[in-house]
Image (cartoon, coloured by chain):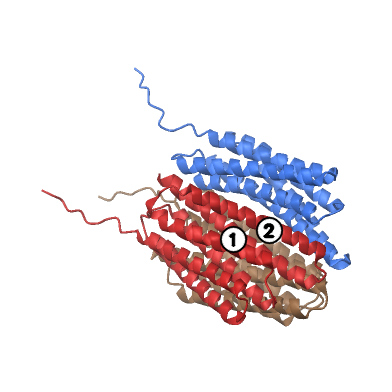
Chain colours: A red, B brown, C blue
């Protein structure tokens, strides 16, 4: 005799698919920002495109939170789902914040250090997208976490050095004020990437 | 035969009453800021009044957290109680931050856009006060959430446009620096209103 | 007859020891910042020393989080452990942020108000270090919480007054921009001290 139990625990693998969609969308945003600073033209159109990606990110985040609220048993801890979704959203918010400020601050040309920072964020986004895809296997993601930390430290160094330099050498207060804010937001994007690495590390530690 | 059970679950409807008190107090703060920018006189007295409202908000928040720590079974999820109380507090903090900066930055006259933003925050506060009163019925609050999101988007647009304009057209760095901060804090107040809408949406989704 | 039960609940007193290490390290950072502003020389070396303390703090925080992820039953609530560890880390981050900015903004001499704020943070750090040591006894820490709140209020007053004064009287936008940021970060450090007092109050309320 076999007893066939009803499937009590719903298939919650969907969370992983949603995180993959969110990370992929975030990487798309980072790629669009990279394109923006490398091919600095058609600003309005490109910034609007990044805004659309950010709205798409909002929708994915909203779906994850909604599913979380309606799900009784989750494959990873509830608060980790919440935190991972929020931090992916925060990276994309910061990316959009940088793009829109380059536009409405009427920045004529991104500085080499701005390009460097955008590259770092793009690299971190690529690492995150890969790690999020691997998340469902709960394999060790230690090398990923170390690499993200390295990238965040590099971003921090560049940003601090540039803000110090602006305060010293920049003759125009407008330029100083604008770039201080843009560098600050680039650093914020890198900080949220590091937070994602920490959340992922926590998820892996708890489930292995 | 009837078995009369002792009331094991304590009456925790008090949380709803406390949230109503907190939302009402926050609305009072938003109203006081609205009065301040429309009748821009007796600044010191009016700012002190807003500070008193903010202290009152601190007390209510403290009471909620204290009750949360002492309560075993809560009518809504613990973390939602925590988040809702904190975000209501954050809106009021931002309101007080705007009022005090108008005063100690010696702003002679609020700009039309500042008045517009204060109006948006007041509208959002009214919506929130109503939604928090309805919370105990766990009825759908979707229209409320959509309206708050719309208000936050509008606040965001105005604030960004004004900061961009300050960077372009304002001749005096002092004025630029002061208003950049004030617009930023007005935007922060609107952001926290949106966070409240998200928490309330989550509470309703989970309990219906 | 005695039944000897295996020790099912692991010795989790280690959390308290780790928090003590974290608080002690944070106090060391506050002391190093105090030394920096009182003996304003050998900046590079002193700032590097504070950075080392901050890295040490990162390691302790990481250890706490890792232990939390691996521990099934905790002596205090999981989210309180998370919050206390994070906030201790945030105070030290803010301290390091102040020190490094004094250096790379090439500040020639700290203002008397900067020295006063550093003293307040050092006092708060001393109080916190003592409270964290007492935490394992779950005794009332109300006088400690009141004192930290008083210190935070004082820091807030000084910081606001100084930023207002900078906007009014400072002729050089560079000086205004630099000190606005440094005062802001000193206030942030005091804010996180207050958050620690709130977390500790919550822990004590829940366990008595």
- Residue C128 can be seen in this image: no
Q: Residues within 10 Å of mark 2 (few under 14, many from 20)?
A: some
Mark 2 → mark 1, Cα distance in angstroms: 11 Å
Q: Please tell me which residue is depicted at 30% across the width and 58% down the height of the picture.
A: A10
Q: Which residue is nearer to you in this view: C103 or C9?
A: C103
Mark 2 — residue? A158
The residue under the point 43% across, 52% down is A77
Q: Are marks 2 and 1 in contact (CB under 8 Å)?
A: yes
Outermost residue on the top side: it is C1
Q: Secondary structure at mark 1?
A: helix
User: How far across and how far down the image is residue A192, in percent?
Assistant: 57, 58
In the picture, the disc for residue C127 is none
Residue A39 location, quadrant? bottom right
Q: Position of residue C36 (x, y in %)?
A: 81, 44
What SS does tag 2 mark? helix
Report x, y in % for residue A21.
Answer: 43, 66
Q: Would residue B9 be found to the left or right of residue B17 on screen?
A: left
Asked if badges 2 and 1 are on one and the same chain, I answer yes
User: Between residues B145 and A111, which one lies in front from this camera angle?
Assistant: A111
Please give left or right for residue B182 compared with residue B18 in the image: right
Dot label at residue A120: 1
Q: Earlier in the sequence, mark 2 or mark 1?
A: 1
Residue A63 shows up from this direction:
yes
Image position, residue A93 (x, y; %): 57, 68
Task: Determine whether A138 is above or below B104 in the image.
Answer: above
Name the one closer to the observer, B140 or C177. C177
């Amino acid at each position: 005799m076999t007893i066939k139990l009803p499937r009590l625990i719903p298939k919650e693998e969907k969370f992983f698919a949603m995180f993959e969609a969110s990370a992929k969308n975030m990487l798309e945003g980072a790629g669009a920002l990279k394109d923006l600073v490398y091919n600095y033209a058609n600003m309005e159109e490109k910034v609007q495109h990044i805004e659309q990606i950010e709205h798409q990110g909002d929708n994915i985040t909203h779906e994850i939170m909604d599913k979380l609220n309606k799900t009784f048993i989750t494959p990873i801890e509830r608060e980790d789902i919440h935190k991972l979704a929020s931090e992916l959203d925060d990276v994309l918010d910061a990316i959009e914040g940088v793009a829109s400020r380059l536009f409405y601050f009427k920045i004529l040309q991104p500085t080499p250090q701005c390009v460097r920072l955008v590259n770092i964020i793009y690299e971190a986004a690529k690492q995150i997208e890969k790690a999020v895809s691997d998340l469902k296997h709960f394999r060790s993601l230690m090398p990923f976490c170390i690499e993200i930390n390295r990238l965040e430290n590099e971003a921090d160094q560049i940003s601090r050095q540039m803000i110090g330099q602006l305060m010293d050498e920049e003759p125009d207060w407008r330029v100083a004020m604008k770039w201080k804010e843009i560098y600050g937001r680039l650093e914020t994007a890198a900080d949220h990437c590091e937070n994602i690495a920490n959340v992922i590390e926590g998820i892996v530690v708890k489930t292995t």
